[in-house]
Image: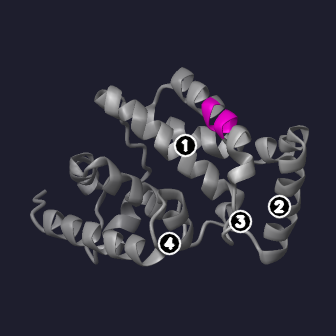
Amino acid sequence: MAINPHFHHTNEQLNEELIIIEAAKLNPENFGPLYNKYYKQIFQYLYQRMDDKDTAFDITSQVFLKALTNLPNYQFKGVPFASWLYRIAHNELMQVFRIQKDRRAINADIGDLKFICEENEEPFFEEYIPAIKKLLTELDSDDLNMVELRFFEKRPFKEIAEILDITEVNAKVRMYRIIEKLKKSMSKIKI
């Protein structure tokens, strides 16, 4: 699977970001560069999962407010600051979905769906798209989030683990189980 460079940082970039984070911990006015760097990513993460722009804007604002408020508690774990923001965003999103279950949306392009087939060692045909999307809607929210993070955003397991507040091994095991579940279901697809 191709790695998405948009979500990955070199050690030098992580260290530079850590300097900005520490400055923001001392003075909230220094939070601006982090906000500017990650606002669009967090908004897109939320909007892709709900297809409601106004609510996505509201939740994005809430994410950054919570991040700024809780910044003194932030601990660097060797992954981009975005992982912490995504964890906050994930929690906020799950809270919305608990209240309004019909808000959940799946936005995937053909390339994303092809990755899922490749990971399942299944052939991909465009005719499969409706069936694959249906299988995805049948996943529970946590499993669907794992699929989105891994296949749609192409995040490494280390970041997925940080976002979901689980161990990296747990993230890999859960993804393996999801793939097995999808593989079983995909073997039943008849076009």
Tell me whether circle 3 and circle 4 mark residues in contact (CB < 8 Å): no
Image quarter for residue 12?
A: bottom right
The residue pinned by badge 1 equals: 89
Q: Is residue 150 visible?
A: yes
Mark in the foreground, 1 or 3: 3
SS for callout 1: helix
Image quarter for residue 97?
A: top left
Identity of the amino acid at label 1?
Ala
Mark in the foreground, 3 or 4: 3
The residue pinned by badge 2 equals: 17
Residue beneath the point at 38% across and 73% down: 170
The span shown in magenta is 62-66
Q: Is residue 49 above or below residue 14?
A: above
Identity of the amino acid at label 4?
Phe
Q: Earlier in the sequence, mark 3 or mark 4?
A: 3
SS for callout 2: helix
Q: Earlier in the sequence, mark 1 or mark 4?
A: 1
Residue 114 appears at what percent x and percent y?
Answer: 38, 64
Tell me whether circle 4 and circle 2 mark residues in contact (CB < 8 Å): no
SS for callout 3: loop
Image quarter for residue 39?
A: top right
Report, in whole angstroms, how far the alpha carbon at label 4 lies from the one at label 2.
21 Å
The residue pinned by badge 3 equals: 76
Residue beneath the point at 77% across and 41% down: 35
The residue pinned by badge 4 equals: 157
Residue 155 is left or right of residue 134, and the answer is right
Tell me whether circle 1 and circle 2 mark residues in contact (CB < 8 Å): no
